[in-house]
Amino acid sequence: MAFVVSARKYRPVHFEDVVGQAHVSQTLKKALQTDHLAHAFLFCGPRGVGKTTCARILAKVINCQNVTANFEPCGECESCRAFNENASFNIMELDAASNNSVEHIRSLVEQVRFQPQQGKYKVFIIDEVHMLSASAFNAFLKTLEEPPSYAIFILATTEKHKIIPTILSRCQIFDFKRIQVKDTVAHLQKICDAEGIEAEGDALHIIAQKADGALRDALSIFDRITSASGKKITYDDVITNLNVLDYDYFFRITDALLTEDLRQVLLIFDSVLRNGFEGDHFINGLAEHLRNLLVCKDAETLRLLEVGDSLRERYRQQAAIAPASFLLTALNLCNDCDINFKMARQKPLHVELYLIKMCYAGQAVKMAAESGAEKKTPDLKEVANKQAAPVIPAPAPPKTPQPVVSPIKIEEKEAPQNTEIPSPGYAEVLPPKQDAILVKEPVAAPVSSLRKTGIGGLNSMSLKEIHAEIEEAETNGGPVPDAKLTDEDLKEAWAAYIDSIDKDSVKTILRGADIGIDPEQITVTVGSALAESTVRQEMELMEFLRKKLHAPLLALSIKLDPSRSNAAPAKPKRLTDSEKYHAMRAVNPLVDEMRKRFDLGLENE
């Protein structure tokens, strides 16, 4: 007897035999039971999950003469036997991959016109329907929307997104899902029992995982393994034939990584390369192994692990000793290694470098944790000292009696941090967050100038310069720093500074600025952002003005007023002769009358 592959030999003939698609089977049975059968179905999903099989079973049930109590085909009536022998005139299958033209669809539409010879329905199964051309789809639309009462269409596709919306809207859509590993293993075990084959559970799990949710692929792999191994399928036979890395490699290398045994890690990887496996194949397998260990950390997620019972226990034991921080770090390194693998010139060395990083990942995490725990809390006293203004030690007390010191409260206004306050012989700075400064009564006059400091205030001059200004003013009888300054004084000093600089562009900007002064601040109003930036960059301006006006605490404020812009007005557009004429005619319509009377014309017309 000729050999028949398992995918055909064990193809389901009843809805209850379909693996992993109970949601589709139950819905179709309910439709048959209530006689709510649609005229067009669309079965979509991955390859090898039972789309065409369900279509064939549905077609058999529709025309079966002795439908069972649970709405399954009997398999014994004349219609079922004709279908099993591929001799049924009521059930027609069309492969749209090779019959995708308009002519093929027109031929199918012609067959729809003829009523069934036996049974109640004519069923048309169109496989790989997404391969139809756009013209073929359009030729099929009318028939699919309003077929005869005896015609039923069942379309199957693996690429639903390629089907035009007008077809989708005319069909009842069923989405088939990938078959779970446990369902595939159970089906393979049934076949093994029927064929008298002894198979290890781990071996069937490897086959199911390699099939990636497609039962037909799993059956093809099963036939291949059976041909090589005979009546006994072992785990070693499967990984040898499928070129799959043994789980043992990953368990051993994970143990070596956890113990930071770099020598063993490199030896295991060398063994993997000698057995003919590529580095990316190994690193992807290691990433999956680390993911499984992370899954085993929680009893709730343990069900996500699709392996045999013996292997599950081994995973659980290793997961108990593997820190989650190490697993996450190693997974991240595996991902980076896989991303950069294609660009690496020395691919084995590339993987070895990442394995070395994984080997010492635990140490790195531990060091980071220790450094974070041992980080010292900043000393509040030191912080206060840094934030406070620097204290200059007072001079040695003279032999003469000292004047009485009285506290003078100073109003707080927006002052920059780290403000230096003149202290030798004038003030003693208290700790931060206190409102009082002790000032000696003989020099109470300059204290009022400390009330407000703006841009270019205390921070712009050193303490020595401030003291020198004040002492010079008091000694020589000149104007004290707190004296009332006038706009004439400022304009004179401003003009003197302009004459002292060389850059013509800066001179122009400063001359065009509007300046004003109050007792403690100069206000400069400019007309553009460029002028504002230029004034701010003149670092010597405030120092010059402070010395010229004998005001060491003088501040600077710059305001932007676009209305003061000195930009030249745009030149008017030069008019053409025609534009000049039309403008003149708009002002005085008699111009046009004069042109017509003297038969005048424009040169550009």
Image (cartoon, rainbow, N blue to C red):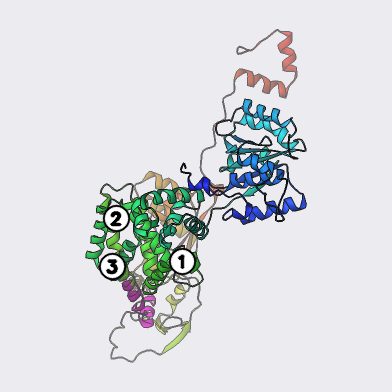
Identify residue type, mark 3: Ala
Residue found 73% across the figure and 10% down from its top: 596
Is residue 336 in sight in this rendering? no
Region rendered in magenta: 366-392
Mark 1 sits on what residue? 454
Q: Secondary structure at mark 1?
A: loop
The percent position of residue 445, horizontal first and vertical second, equals: 44, 77
Q: Residue furthest top?
A: 599
Q: Secondary structure at mark 2?
A: helix
Is residue 71 in sight in this rendering? yes
Q: CA distance from mark 1 to mark 2?
A: 61 Å
Residue found 59% across the figure and 20% down from its top: 576
Instruction: Look at discs 1 and 3 and give the one toward the viewer.
Output: 3
Mark 3 sits on what residue? 256
Residues under numbered marks 1 and 2 in contact, where contact means CB atoms less than 8 Å apart? no
Report the front residue among 484 and 252: 252
The percent position of residue 290, horizontal first and vertical second, equals: 39, 64
Q: With respect to residue 278, does 461 lie above or below?
A: below
Q: With respect to residue 347, does 490 lie above or below?
A: below
Mark 2 sits on what residue? 351
Q: Is residue 326 magenta?
A: no
Report the front residue among 489 and 416: 416
Instruction: Look at discs 1 and 2 and give the one toward the viewer.
Output: 2
Q: Quadrant of residue 594?
A: top right
